[in-house]
Image: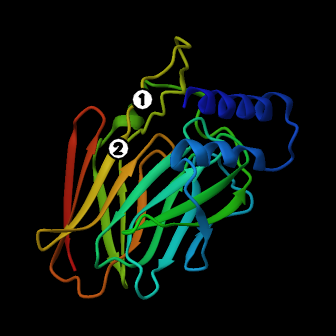
Protein backbone atom coordinates (compact mmCIF):
# COMPACT_ATOMS: atom_id res chain seq x y z
CA UNK A 1 0.00 0.00 0.00
CA UNK A 2 2.82 2.45 0.86
CA UNK A 3 4.45 1.79 -2.54
CA UNK A 4 1.17 2.64 -4.30
CA UNK A 5 0.79 5.87 -2.29
CA UNK A 6 4.41 6.83 -3.08
CA UNK A 7 3.84 6.24 -6.81
CA UNK A 8 0.68 8.37 -6.79
CA UNK A 9 2.45 11.14 -4.86
CA UNK A 10 5.39 11.06 -7.29
CA UNK A 11 3.16 11.31 -10.37
CA UNK A 12 1.19 14.18 -8.84
CA UNK A 13 4.42 15.97 -7.91
CA UNK A 14 5.76 15.60 -11.45
CA UNK A 15 2.51 16.96 -12.86
CA UNK A 16 2.68 20.00 -10.55
CA UNK A 17 6.36 20.85 -10.81
CA UNK A 18 7.20 20.11 -14.45
CA UNK A 19 3.79 20.87 -15.95
CA UNK A 20 4.33 18.11 -18.52
CA UNK A 21 0.64 17.70 -19.23
CA UNK A 22 -1.58 20.39 -20.66
CA UNK A 23 -4.45 18.21 -19.52
CA UNK A 24 -5.27 15.61 -16.87
CA UNK A 25 -2.72 12.84 -16.37
CA UNK A 26 -4.22 9.43 -17.31
CA UNK A 27 -1.31 7.57 -15.74
CA UNK A 28 -2.61 8.24 -12.23
CA UNK A 29 -5.78 6.15 -12.43
CA UNK A 30 -4.23 2.64 -12.37
CA UNK A 31 -2.50 3.48 -9.08
CA UNK A 32 -5.57 5.16 -7.58
CA UNK A 33 -7.70 2.18 -8.64
CA UNK A 34 -5.27 -0.28 -7.05
CA UNK A 35 -5.19 1.76 -3.84
CA UNK A 36 -8.99 1.93 -3.52
CA UNK A 37 -10.28 -1.20 -5.26
CA UNK A 38 -7.26 -3.49 -5.65
CA UNK A 39 -7.68 -5.77 -8.70
CA UNK A 40 -11.49 -5.69 -8.78
CA UNK A 41 -12.92 -5.14 -12.30
CA UNK A 42 -14.72 -1.85 -12.95
CA UNK A 43 -17.30 -1.54 -15.73
CA UNK A 44 -17.80 1.76 -17.57
CA UNK A 45 -21.59 1.79 -17.36
CA UNK A 46 -24.06 4.03 -19.16
CA UNK A 47 -26.44 4.19 -16.21
CA UNK A 48 -23.84 6.11 -14.16
CA UNK A 49 -22.97 9.63 -15.32
CA UNK A 50 -20.48 12.09 -13.80
CA UNK A 51 -20.44 15.55 -15.36
CA UNK A 52 -18.86 18.93 -14.75
CA UNK A 53 -17.32 21.88 -16.60
CA UNK A 54 -14.45 21.30 -19.02
CA UNK A 55 -12.66 24.18 -17.31
CA UNK A 56 -13.66 25.46 -13.86
CA UNK A 57 -13.53 29.17 -13.07
CA UNK A 58 -12.29 28.39 -9.55
CA UNK A 59 -10.41 25.33 -8.31
CA UNK A 60 -11.94 25.87 -4.88
CA UNK A 61 -15.56 25.62 -6.10
CA UNK A 62 -15.87 23.13 -8.96
CA UNK A 63 -19.47 22.06 -9.66
CA UNK A 64 -19.99 18.38 -10.44
CA UNK A 65 -23.13 16.35 -10.97
CA UNK A 66 -23.78 12.66 -10.40
CA UNK A 67 -26.69 10.95 -12.15
CA UNK A 68 -27.57 7.30 -11.74
CA UNK A 69 -30.54 5.16 -12.70
CA UNK A 70 -30.05 1.60 -11.52
CA UNK A 71 -31.34 -0.98 -14.03
CA UNK A 72 -33.68 -3.80 -13.00
CA UNK A 73 -31.92 -6.31 -10.80
CA UNK A 74 -29.20 -3.89 -9.70
CA UNK A 75 -29.27 -2.19 -6.29
CA UNK A 76 -26.57 0.44 -5.78
CA UNK A 77 -25.38 0.65 -2.19
CA UNK A 78 -22.91 3.52 -2.45
CA UNK A 79 -21.04 5.77 -4.87
CA UNK A 80 -17.44 6.94 -4.49
CA UNK A 81 -16.45 10.39 -5.80
CA UNK A 82 -12.78 10.35 -6.83
CA UNK A 83 -10.37 13.03 -8.08
CA UNK A 84 -7.29 11.32 -9.53
CA UNK A 85 -4.78 14.16 -9.11
CA UNK A 86 -5.86 15.59 -5.75
CA UNK A 87 -3.61 15.11 -2.70
CA UNK A 88 -6.45 12.99 -1.27
CA UNK A 89 -8.10 11.24 -4.21
CA UNK A 90 -11.21 9.98 -2.39
CA UNK A 91 -13.48 13.04 -2.17
CA UNK A 92 -16.74 11.59 -0.79
CA UNK A 93 -18.91 8.51 -0.47
CA UNK A 94 -22.68 8.60 -0.99
CA UNK A 95 -24.57 5.82 0.79
CA UNK A 96 -27.89 5.20 -0.96
CA UNK A 97 -31.07 3.83 0.55
CA UNK A 98 -33.16 1.29 -1.36
CA UNK A 99 -35.59 4.14 -2.12
CA UNK A 100 -32.84 6.16 -3.73
CA UNK A 101 -31.95 4.25 -6.89
CA UNK A 102 -32.76 7.20 -9.18
CA UNK A 103 -29.94 9.57 -8.26
CA UNK A 104 -29.40 13.20 -9.22
CA UNK A 105 -26.85 14.84 -6.91
CA UNK A 106 -24.89 18.05 -7.44
CA UNK A 107 -22.03 19.18 -5.22
CA UNK A 108 -18.92 21.37 -5.33
CA UNK A 109 -15.38 20.08 -4.98
CA UNK A 110 -11.83 21.36 -4.61
CA UNK A 111 -9.28 20.52 -7.31
CA UNK A 112 -5.56 21.13 -6.97
CA UNK A 113 -4.76 20.57 -10.65
CA UNK A 114 -6.27 19.29 -13.90
CA UNK A 115 -7.69 15.83 -13.27
CA UNK A 116 -10.09 13.11 -14.22
CA UNK A 117 -13.02 13.14 -11.80
CA UNK A 118 -14.80 9.81 -11.35
CA UNK A 119 -17.94 8.32 -9.89
CA UNK A 120 -17.59 4.64 -9.01
CA UNK A 121 -20.82 2.94 -7.94
CA UNK A 122 -20.90 -0.35 -6.04
CA UNK A 123 -23.94 -2.63 -6.00
CA UNK A 124 -25.09 -5.06 -3.32
CA UNK A 125 -23.17 -7.88 -5.02
CA UNK A 126 -19.89 -5.97 -5.01
CA UNK A 127 -19.88 -5.10 -8.72
CA UNK A 128 -18.32 -1.75 -9.62
CA UNK A 129 -19.52 0.68 -12.31
CA UNK A 130 -17.80 3.92 -13.36
CA UNK A 131 -18.24 7.21 -15.17
CA UNK A 132 -15.59 9.93 -15.45
CA UNK A 133 -14.80 13.32 -16.96
CA UNK A 134 -11.67 15.39 -17.38
CA UNK A 135 -11.90 18.81 -15.68
CA UNK A 136 -9.36 21.64 -15.89
CA UNK A 137 -8.86 23.48 -12.57
CA UNK A 138 -6.08 24.41 -10.15
CA UNK A 139 -5.16 25.59 -6.67
CA UNK A 140 -8.32 24.58 -4.83
CA UNK A 141 -6.81 22.49 -2.02
CA UNK A 142 -3.87 24.61 -0.88
CA UNK A 143 -2.78 28.26 -0.88
CA UNK A 144 -2.71 30.90 1.88
CA UNK A 145 -5.69 31.97 3.98
CA UNK A 146 -6.35 34.54 6.68
CA UNK A 147 -7.43 32.08 9.33
CA UNK A 148 -8.43 34.98 11.59
CA UNK A 149 -10.96 36.33 9.09
CA UNK A 150 -14.22 36.35 11.10
CA UNK A 151 -16.22 35.65 7.95
CA UNK A 152 -14.79 32.12 7.82
CA UNK A 153 -16.51 31.03 11.02
CA UNK A 154 -19.40 33.51 11.22
CA UNK A 155 -22.64 31.56 11.59
CA UNK A 156 -20.64 28.31 11.82
CA UNK A 157 -22.89 25.35 11.08
CA UNK A 158 -25.81 27.42 9.85
CA UNK A 159 -27.74 25.29 7.37
CA UNK A 160 -29.58 26.85 4.46
CA UNK A 161 -32.15 24.40 3.16
CA UNK A 162 -34.93 24.71 0.61
CA UNK A 163 -37.14 22.45 -1.46
CA UNK A 164 -37.71 23.22 -5.12
CA UNK A 165 -39.65 20.95 -7.46
CA UNK A 166 -38.35 17.43 -6.64
CA UNK A 167 -35.02 18.68 -5.27
CA UNK A 168 -33.65 19.51 -1.86
CA UNK A 169 -30.87 22.13 -1.84
CA UNK A 170 -28.63 22.50 1.21
CA UNK A 171 -25.56 24.51 2.16
CA UNK A 172 -23.72 24.39 5.49
CA UNK A 173 -21.69 27.42 6.60
CA UNK A 174 -18.24 25.98 7.37
CA UNK A 175 -14.63 26.81 6.38
CA UNK A 176 -13.81 23.18 5.48
CA UNK A 177 -10.05 23.60 5.95
CA UNK A 178 -8.16 20.94 4.00
CA UNK A 179 -5.05 20.72 6.19
CA UNK A 180 -2.99 21.79 3.16
CA UNK A 181 -3.68 25.53 3.37
CA UNK A 182 -1.25 27.87 5.13
CA UNK A 183 -1.92 30.64 7.62
CA UNK A 184 -1.33 34.01 5.97
CA UNK A 185 0.37 35.35 9.13
CA UNK A 186 2.47 32.46 10.44
CA UNK A 187 2.97 30.47 7.26
CA UNK A 188 2.13 27.29 9.15
CA UNK A 189 -0.38 24.73 8.00
CA UNK A 190 -3.98 25.23 9.11
CA UNK A 191 -5.26 22.01 10.72
CA UNK A 192 -7.85 20.01 8.79
CA UNK A 193 -11.40 20.87 9.83
CA UNK A 194 -14.27 19.71 7.64
CA UNK A 195 -17.92 18.69 7.70
CA UNK A 196 -17.35 14.95 7.57
CA UNK A 197 -20.86 13.47 7.68
CA UNK A 198 -24.25 14.58 6.35
CA UNK A 199 -27.30 12.40 6.94
CA UNK A 200 -30.71 13.06 5.38
CA UNK A 201 -33.67 11.43 7.11
CA UNK A 202 -37.41 11.14 6.51
CA UNK A 203 -39.89 9.35 8.77
CA UNK A 204 -37.00 8.09 10.94
CA UNK A 205 -35.34 6.42 7.94
CA UNK A 206 -32.07 7.41 6.28
CA UNK A 207 -32.60 8.55 2.68
CA UNK A 208 -29.01 9.48 1.96
CA UNK A 209 -25.81 9.52 3.99
CA UNK A 210 -22.69 11.34 2.80
CA UNK A 211 -19.17 10.88 4.13
CA UNK A 212 -16.95 13.78 3.02
CA UNK A 213 -13.17 14.10 2.74
CA UNK A 214 -11.04 17.24 2.32
CA UNK A 215 -11.87 17.76 -1.38
CA UNK A 216 -15.37 19.08 -0.66
CA UNK A 217 -15.55 22.87 -0.98
CA UNK A 218 -15.93 25.50 1.71
CA UNK A 219 -19.57 25.85 2.82
CA UNK A 220 -20.52 22.33 1.65
CA UNK A 221 -23.28 22.38 -0.96
CA UNK A 222 -25.55 19.53 -1.99
CA UNK A 223 -28.52 19.47 -4.33
CA UNK A 224 -30.31 16.13 -4.36
CA UNK A 225 -33.41 14.81 -6.06
CA UNK A 226 -35.68 13.35 -3.39
CA UNK A 227 -37.02 9.81 -3.89
CA UNK A 228 -40.65 9.45 -4.89
CA UNK A 229 -43.01 9.23 -1.95
CA UNK A 230 -41.01 11.42 0.44
CA UNK A 231 -43.46 13.60 2.35
CA UNK A 232 -43.43 15.30 5.73
CA UNK A 233 -40.25 16.44 7.45
CA UNK A 234 -36.82 15.87 5.94
CA UNK A 235 -34.05 16.32 8.50
CA UNK A 236 -30.37 16.98 7.77
CA UNK A 237 -27.96 16.06 10.56
CA UNK A 238 -24.29 16.96 10.08
CA UNK A 239 -21.11 16.65 12.14
CA UNK A 240 -17.63 18.09 11.62
CA UNK A 241 -14.21 16.73 12.57
CA UNK A 242 -14.21 18.71 15.82
CA UNK A 243 -17.42 16.99 16.90
CA UNK A 244 -19.68 19.99 16.32
CA UNK A 245 -23.19 18.87 15.34
CA UNK A 246 -25.60 20.78 13.15
CA UNK A 247 -29.22 20.02 12.27
CA UNK A 248 -32.03 21.49 10.19
CA UNK A 249 -35.40 20.22 8.99
CA UNK A 250 -37.84 21.20 6.30
CA UNK A 251 -41.39 20.10 5.56
CA UNK A 252 -41.92 18.71 2.06
- Residue beneath the point at 38% across and 33% down: 193
Q: Are marks 1 and 2 in contact (CB under 8 Å)?
A: no
Q: How far separated are the C-alphas under marks 1 and 2? A: 10 Å
Read off the residue under disc 1.
192
Residue 126 in the image: x percent, y percent?
42, 64
Residue 153 horizontal side relative to residue 216, left or right: left
- Residue beneath the point at 30% across and 54% down: 198
Quarter of the image for the C terminus: give it. Answer: bottom left
SS for callout 2: strand
Give whichever of 115, 250 is nearer the camera: 115
Q: Is residue 199 something one can see in this rendering?
A: yes
Q: Where is residue 145, by image quadrant?
A: top right
Residue 34 in the image: x percent, y percent?
59, 45
Quarter of the image for the N terminus: give it. Answer: top right
Read off the residue under disc 2.
195
Residue 20 in the image: x percent, y percent?
88, 38
Amino acid sequence: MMNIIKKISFLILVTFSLNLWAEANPELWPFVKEKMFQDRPIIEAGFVKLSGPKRASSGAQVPVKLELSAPDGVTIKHVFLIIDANPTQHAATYFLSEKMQEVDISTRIRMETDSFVRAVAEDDKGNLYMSFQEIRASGGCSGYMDVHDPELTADLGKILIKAKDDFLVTRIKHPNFTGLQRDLDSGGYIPEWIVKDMIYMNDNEVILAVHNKISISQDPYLKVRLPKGVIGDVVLNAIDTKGNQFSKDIRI
